[in-house]
Amino acid sequence: MTILITGGTGLVGQLLVEKLRERRHEVRILTRKKSDDPKEFYWNIAEKEIDDKAFQKLDAIIHLAGATISERWSDAYKKEMYSSRVDTANLLLERCKKNNVHLESFISASGINYYGTFTSDQILKESDGVVQKDFLAELCVSWENAANKFSTVADRVVCLRTAMVLAKNGGAFPLLKKLVNLNMGSGVGSGNQWMNWIHVDDLVNMYVFAIENQKMNGIYNAVADDVPTNKTFMKDLANASDKFFLPFNVPKFVLKSVLGEMSSIILEGTRANNKKIKSLGFDFKYNHVKEAFKSLI
């Protein structure tokens, strides 16, 4: 299968490209840097420019592009977060139509914050919709709406509502590990907020599963079974690292003063289940956070 990937040089993208090529798929990458590599194609979102050669004899698109949410959210950065997800998807669709491309599948990232960023014991499933409106919920809704427009040019559209990705060399884990290594591991805020997560290996395998399994269609929560509280998560990380765990939590106001509105993704959290993806036969390699920590440390 010939697959075009956006965000192919990112944390998940690099591993996914390698995995797909191992499985004999032809993988093309859209990149913002001009390259002599015949498998890399230039695009410029601001100028609405994409090399049309990327769409020749194309079977599928995996849309991973998106500015990180782990930055302070100024108004300008919020626009970048939106544009890097939604405007890019709209541009891809425009070019598919221009080049008369019909896809077997369009697979898009989304976020578990689709439901809203709040703390609750409610266990969320894909059919629940938005529970609490906020910036990230609205962003994810727009992201998924842009993906769903591909139903006009693709047989299947899949969105993976992704939790915090645990990976050794990127994302939140190296920073959390650094704090623990300094014996500064502790809960944050109340410490009772739930922490959805997924190991990067499982997320990569889920994208491969989405590409190769034609029964997969629609929205899926990309989360592990085990959803600990923030305090338990940090305590398990400290124990796995043979470091101290501080008995007091970092106050909310400290996070809010340093991180602004973005602090909500750390201070709040509910639970989501993964029964829908597992019902199709997807097996998680890392379903418990202690197992994930052991593999990463």
Image: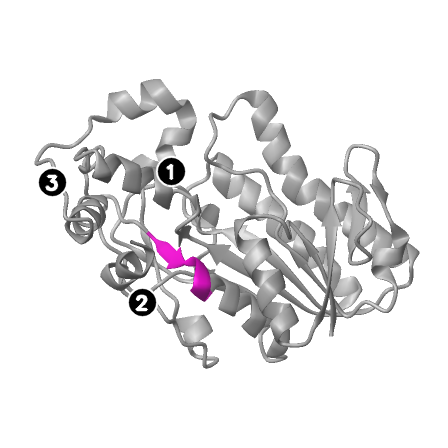
218 relative to 223 in the view: left or right: right
Q: Which image quarter holds the N terminus?
A: bottom right
**Residue marked by disc 2:** 287
N-terminal of the two: label 3 or label 2? 3
- Residue at image location 46% in from the left, 72% down from the top: 277
Structural crowding at the residue carrying mark 3, measured as other residues with C-alpha within 10 Å and reported as few (<14), some (14–19) or many (≥20): some
Classify mark 1: helix, strand or loop. Answer: helix
Residue extending farthest left = 247
Coordinates of residue 286 in the picture (x, y in percent)? 34, 67
How far apart in space, not on screen, are marks 3 and 1 (Cα)? 25 Å
**Residue marked by disc 1:** 265
Residue extending farthest front = 36
**Three-letter code, disc 3:** Phe
Image quarter for residue 20? bottom right
- Residue at image location 30% in from the left, 40% down from the top: 176
297 relative to 6 in the view: left or right: left
Please provide the residue range marked out in magenta: 196-202
Residue extending farthest top = 257
Classify mark 2: helix, strand or loop. Answer: loop
